[in-house]
Amino acid sequence: MVWRPSPEYVERANVTRFMRANGIGSHDELVARSTADVEWFWDAVVRDLGIDFSTPYERVLDTSRGVEWATWFVGGELNLAHNCLDRWADRTPHALALVWEGEDGEVRRVSYEQLRLETDRLAHALRAIGVGPGDAVGIFLPMAPETVAATLACAKVGAVYVPIFSGFGAEAVATRLADARARVLLTADGFLHRGSVVQMKESADRAADLAGCVEHLLVWLRLDRPKLEWNLGRDLRWDDFVGEQPGHFETESFPAEHPLFIGYTSGTSGRPKGAVHVHGGFLVKISEEVAYQADLHQGEVLHWVTDLGWIMGPWELVGAGALGATVLLTEGSPTHPGADRLWATIERHGVTTLGVSPTLIRSLIPHARAGCGGGRFSVSRAGRPDKGGGWTHEKTPGNRAFDGDDHPAPVRRQRRGDTLEELGLLRLPLADRRGHRDSDVPGV
């Protein structure tokens, strides 16, 4: 046993609240009931986390067409943006929705009220250029407040966003845009990485030409680079076009199975494959993971070292937003300008839950240091053997992972093979993966 939660930790845990509310006395009983009665479990999750359906669902799960065509929250209508943004902007308007730190040291703190204003203006901007329900919108942006607003604005208007890794070249971007038939591409002039400028606008221009379906580029001038080429019939400046839009957008409700985004595989083993994620299932499943497995609470800060183009990007944005917590986004490399940037960032912004990949852990091993505040650590896996998780237990930071009371801190491993796989810390609701049917878990 590497880490055992203290009685105080157990008492405060989200899953403890869930168990008590449902009359469950032990972990074993919870595992047994959640796997024996899947519909009860997910209905209980919705109620426990207060997920709002504007139209209540009539049934949790319908497998009448076969498990491969399972549908969730039948008859229900909702909008992910309402649950991850609007309700918190109403209830806790001044709470921090996100914190962003640029590689140059710039910091922006955005409240839920401020994020809704930016999101609503962007939703109006998308409508103004003809984007409606079911239309695909590419998001080729670094992790920033504008990126969060982009995902939520698409959800508000019912568009299907396509998250694209910010480091891709034009051909990789174009492949995803063409496959999804994206009409609009949201991008930036560039961003900073290891002290250098990554030129995004040029890649976006070329990708739009190659894809042949993009009608508009909406460009955020992150660096305000001079002498950019502009296609006057296609390109729009973010600050100008979005800034002139109304500050309130009436969020629409859609059926629970309405598409939210298309997550593509990396393409390293062939043509990229897209998985369609939906408003109802993705919201409920990711909320469940972040609440009960990452144990995030309001007032806490989640940071996963990732990009929107990898699945953990949407995961952290939806998970933190659904719980009314704060997500930390960073630009550039976690080991630049110094090898200790990640640990310094954790301390500076009070990160309570950190997610890292095995690759990043390996790069950090030579630079471990003491003095990092307490928190929870999650290690994602990408289907390859790795010793990073063990090192995280033993060496992070100051020779071991620890919590704020100087006890060993929880380190959770997240296993997944391909991004098409069910997006969970565990494949079953709260149990072992063996014997699982894909219909047991919503969201994909």
Image (cartoon, rainbow, N blue to C red):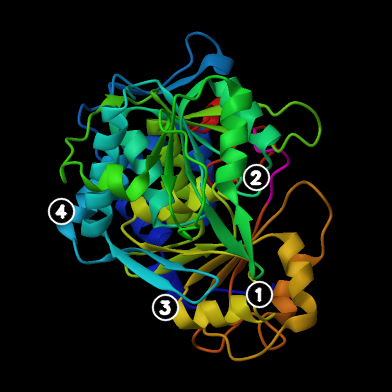
Alpha-carbon distance for marks 3 and 1?
A: 37 Å
Amino acid type, mark 3: Glu
Alpha-carbon distance for marks 1 and 2?
A: 39 Å
Amino acid type, mark 2: Asp
Label of residue 98 in the image: none
**Left or right of 363, for residue 45:** left
- Circle 4: element type: helix
- Circle 1: element type: loop
Q: Name the residue under label 3.
A: 8
Question: Of the residues under marks 4 and 2, which one precedes in the sequence?
Answer: 4
Q: Residue 126's spot in the image, x, y percent?
A: 32, 32
Query: Residue lying furthest top in this view?
Result: 65
Q: Mark 1 points at which residue?
A: 336
Crowd around label 3: few <14 · some 14–19 · many ≥20 (10 Å): few
Q: Is residue 53 magenta?
A: no
Question: Of the residues under marks 3 and 1, which one precedes in the sequence?
Answer: 3
Alpha-carbon distance for marks 4 and 1?
A: 38 Å
Label of residue 432 in the image: 2
